[in-house]
Amino acid sequence: MKTVSSLLDEAWYARYKRISKLNIRSSIYDVTNRCNLRCKGCFFFSSGQDKAAEEENRLDRWEAFIDREMVRGVNLAILIGGEPTLFLDRVDAFYQRLPTFCATNGLIKLPRDRFPDLMVGISLWGDESDEKALRGKDTFAISSRHYAGDPHTYYLYTITPKQIGKIENVVRKIRDIGVKVHMQLLSNDEEVDGFSWTAQELNDVRYEMDDVLDRYPETVISCKYYHEVITSGEMLGRPFGWNECPSVTEPYDTRDPQPKRLIHFIRWASDLKTMHRCCTSETRDCSTCKDGAAHMSWVMVNKRAHIRSTKDLQNWIEVYEMFAKLYQFIPW
Amino acid sequence: MSVETKESDIIVRVAEVMIEELKLEDVTPTSFEPDIDLVDEIGIDSMDLATVALVLQDHYGIRFDEDDYPTLTTVRKIAAYIAARLAS
């Protein structure tokens, strides 16, 4: 029987042990149905999730709900939306109770005197031209003023096919304001012209993601195995898709056989009753989904499948470390 | 149905379930080292443990408390946990 210590040297084994018992149990919460942007390709609006439920407006109900979530075993709250910073009291209700991550477009500055160490992930969809084409404005010009030098912030850079050849410029801009960056790929849910991936483009973007990781290791929070998995859609020869995805809402998971999945994962709508199918949307084609967190989780829940060679296990460790850094379970 | 009650027999049964459910290779129920750390060495995670616990619950007619999972780090500890529940 292959054991972890038989595959790793002392330094890698120490890295493994640092993360092996973290037991992260996340769920995702729509804080609101409202947003101060309308982006082409945003699954929340394109799939009608903003109309799936009436928003709960009473803060005491949010607080009671979060308490129940903690009893359910959730130890990481991932806040998305809409735009969570439109409702800071709701964000605070999570933040006061459990480790919390807040996704935002960065247009509203989260007050650091109220949320000193809340991890913030700022969505960014490219350089100025892509941002204007897809989101109607260059959000970086605003978010970079709000969060420059913030140690508890990173940019979640959603790379589009039009970014090939430009990724380094974006990474350098982020480095220059003293913030980290993590990368994922656009899933073109709305089939916006020119923003769907070809096989060649996926090869090219993988090369470029690897290159910026090598050249900006202090800025880019990533690893090459993640780049391989997200661009190829394969892990250990298995294709990503509905039958493999770990980020399916638990009560909706009727798959048989059930794959390895995130325990107790639920994606909650903002009425605190309605559940969405998964971490993205019911309308998304799972076989072409490029969601970064889903792919990371896919690797993470398949730990034992990676205990087959030293390189495979090191790959798994790097992906887990990346996730743990992005959600502040271990330092940068 | 009678079930094992001696801890040494429970250890073999737990190892057998673990090998079957988690498809562990190159190991038998009797060669499974009962004190090997399941997380640090075998790479078992909480979902694996939940899978094994479900089978053992059915077999022994006991209940595993999910809050106890972090303490169940070896086959011997799982066997002792089962034995304690059978005795109570």
Image: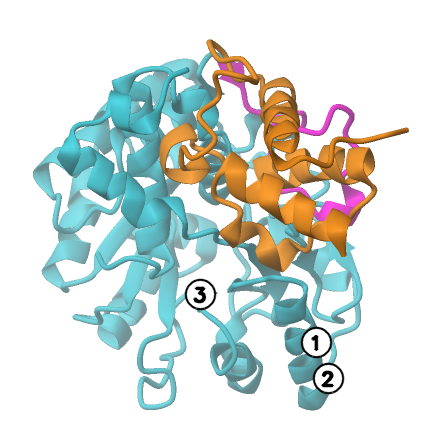
Q: Give the side of residue A159 with respect to residue A171, left or right.
A: right
Q: Judge if badges 3 and 2 mark residues of a common chain.
A: yes
Percent of width and height locating residue B50? 65, 41
Say which amino acid is labelled 1. Phe
Q: Secondary structure at mark 1?
A: helix
- Tell which subunit mark 3 falls on: A
Labels 1 and 3: the sequence-earlier one: 1
Labels 3 and 2: the sequence-earlier one: 2
Q: Is residue A187 visible?
A: no
Q: Secondary structure at mark 2?
A: helix
For marks 1 and 3, give the one nearer the viewer: 1
Q: Label 1: which residue?
A: A65
Q: Label 3: which residue?
A: A101
Letter of the orange chain: B
Task: Between residue A278 and residue A70, name the one nearer to us.
Answer: A70
Q: Is residue A112 rendered magenta in the image?
A: no
**Screen quadrant of the C terminus of chain A:** bottom left
In the figure, the shade used to draw chain A is cyan
Q: Label 2: which residue?
A: A61
Q: Residues within 10 Å of mark 3 (few under 14, many from 20)?
A: many
Task: Between residue A171 and residue A161, name the one nearer to us.
Answer: A171
Q: Residues within 10 Å of mark 1 (few under 14, many from 20)?
A: some
* CA distance separating discs 1 and 2: 6 Å
Q: Is residue A240 rendered magenta in the image?
A: yes
Say which amino acid is labelled 2. Arg
* CA distance separating discs 1 and 3: 17 Å
| A16, above or below A329, in the image | above
